[in-house]
């Protein structure tokens, strides 16, 4: 590991000296993951899904990096994320995946963002707004094949498509759907959704209309259902080196990009009979050594991990004791030693030992997605490039 590749500008802007708690993102890992996804799904185009602050990795920096890597498209959840990317100078095609409200359409048009049309009524709104400004709206038609979130039901798709092709101020760039269970080992529901989608989009061929770009595949399907790659794939979590579930087929090796680190700010001995933390939930029956680390649930270090969480210190795993506070945790180091400023790893590796996002998800009773997207924006992100791990 060398320091040569560290992006110094970003290190400085991340205010390293102010608070030791920070997230470190290895862009080289993201580059490796991206190229493996590209290879696995070629010739499909790749839409990098960067919603929720790029799964906690930092929306703008990751979007710029995706542009460098040659991603074909970006996908975000809400209009504001798309506008921010345009204001930061991102010129590549961007699709907003979420639902729209009528009065948002002029903003989509102004910022050249592709719109998800999920009902005939919304289609009419989009068309009318585009007509009023004498522009053409880029639209992806959303079909619901079994998630029951947004989109026109597959069994009503024909009417929707008919209306869409008749809209003069709409350019139909894509037609898409989303899987509900592609991260499971049993793919029968995924196959059913895919059949519904294929049947619905056959409309275009049957009417001899050029079929728009078809897409349905998320991380789960990319890894274990290649048939669904179609014209474009939409990877999210696997770009960041995290598998979407424990039971998924690990078709490609992924490199986790995110580490979460802090430092010891306090050392003390805790005597037996002196409980630790709010609610006095933990007590020792013999003297122990402990350190305090400045991170807590206010940073996204979930309180649900009480009694389960461990951290790495001097290459060893130690338990977090007492209830997790908003800004601090206490770590039991038994009879070992530690010093102020020693590095503490919450997620990542230290001297060959490792704590994964999956570990935290297990302790908190949730999925890796929720751990990543909840690391608060008050935690500075630092970007490094360390390849060949
Ligand atoms: C979040 C999302 C994705 C990416 O999901 P991953 O499981 O992270 O790959 C793809 N498509 C849509 C519509 C999404 O909302």
Image (cartoon, rainbow, N blue to C red):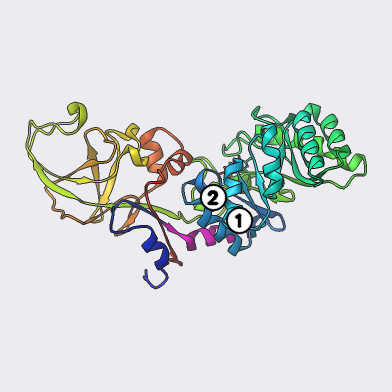
Q: In what quadrant does ligand 1 lie? A: top right
Q: Secondary structure at mark 1?
A: helix
Count of number-bearing discs: 2
Residue 26: say if magenta. Answer: yes
**Is the stretch drawn in magenta largely helix, strand or loop?**
helix
Label 2 to label 1: alpha-carbon separation:
8 Å
Residue drawn 37% across the image and 40% down it: 300
State the mark number for residue 238.
2
**Closest to the observer: 354 or 380?**
380
Query: Can see residue 253?
Result: no
* Quarter holding residue 183: top right
* Residue 163 falls left or right of residue 177: right
**Label 2 crowd bin: few (<14), some (14–19), many (20+), radius 10 Å:** many
Residue stretch in magenta: 25-35
**Label 1 crowd bin: few (<14), some (14–19), many (20+), radius 10 Å:** many
Q: Where does the image place residue 212, in percent across and percent down from the top left?
A: 80, 46
Residue topped by disc 1: 37
Tell me, yes or no, whether the two marked residues, 2 and 1, touch with CB atoms within 8 Å: yes
- Quadrant for the C terminus, please: bottom left
Residue drawn 80% across the image and 40% down it: 132
């Amino acid at each position: 590991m060398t320091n040569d590749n560290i992006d110094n500008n970003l290190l400085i802007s991340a205010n390293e000296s102010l608070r030791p708690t920070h997230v470190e993102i290895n862009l080289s890992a993201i580059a490796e993951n991206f190229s493996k996804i590209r290879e696995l799904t070629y010739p499909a185009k790749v839409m990098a899904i960067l919603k929720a602050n790029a799964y906690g990795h930092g929306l703008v920096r990751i979007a710029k990096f995706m542009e460098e890597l040659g991603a074909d498209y970006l996908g975000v959840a809400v209009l504001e994320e798309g506008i921010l990317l345009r204001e930061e100078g991102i010129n590549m095609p961007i699709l907003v995946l979420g639902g729209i409200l009528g009065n948002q359409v002029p903003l989509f048009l102004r910022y050249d963002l592709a719109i998800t049309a999920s009902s005939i009524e919304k289609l009419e709104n989009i068309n009318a707004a585009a007509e009023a400004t004498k522009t053409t709206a880029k639209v992806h038609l959303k079909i619901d094949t079994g998630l029951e979130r947004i989109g026109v039901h597959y069994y009503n798709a024909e009417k929707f498509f008919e209306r869409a092709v008749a809209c003069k101020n709409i350019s139909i760039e894509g037609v898409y759907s989303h899987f509900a269970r592609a991260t499971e080992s049993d793919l029968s529901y995924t196959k059913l959704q895919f059949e519904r989608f294929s049947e619905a989009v056959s409309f275009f061929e049957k009417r001899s209309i050029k079929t728009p770009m078809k897409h349905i595949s998320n991380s789960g399907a990319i890894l274990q259902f290649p048939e669904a790659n179609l014209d474009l794939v939409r990877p999210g979590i696997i770009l960041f080196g995290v598998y979407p579930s424990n039971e998924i087929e690990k078709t490609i090796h992924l490199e986790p990009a995110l580490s979460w680190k802090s430092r010891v700010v306090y050392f003390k001995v805790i005597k037996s009979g002196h409980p630790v933390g709010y609610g006095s939930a933990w007590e020792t029956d013999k003297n122990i050594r402990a350190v305090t680390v400045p991170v807590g649930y206010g940073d996204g270090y979930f309180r649900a991990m009480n009694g389960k969480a461990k951290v790495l210190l001097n290459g060893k795993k130690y338990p977090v004791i007492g209830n997790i506070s908003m800004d601090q945790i206490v770590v039991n180091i038994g009879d070992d030693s530690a010093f102020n400023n020693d590095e503490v790893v919450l997620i990542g590796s230290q001297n060959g030992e490792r704590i994964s996002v999956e570990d935290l998800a297990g302790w908190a009773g949730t999925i890796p997605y929720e751990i990543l997207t909840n690391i608060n924006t008050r935690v500075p992100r630092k970007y490094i490039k360390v390849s060949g791990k």
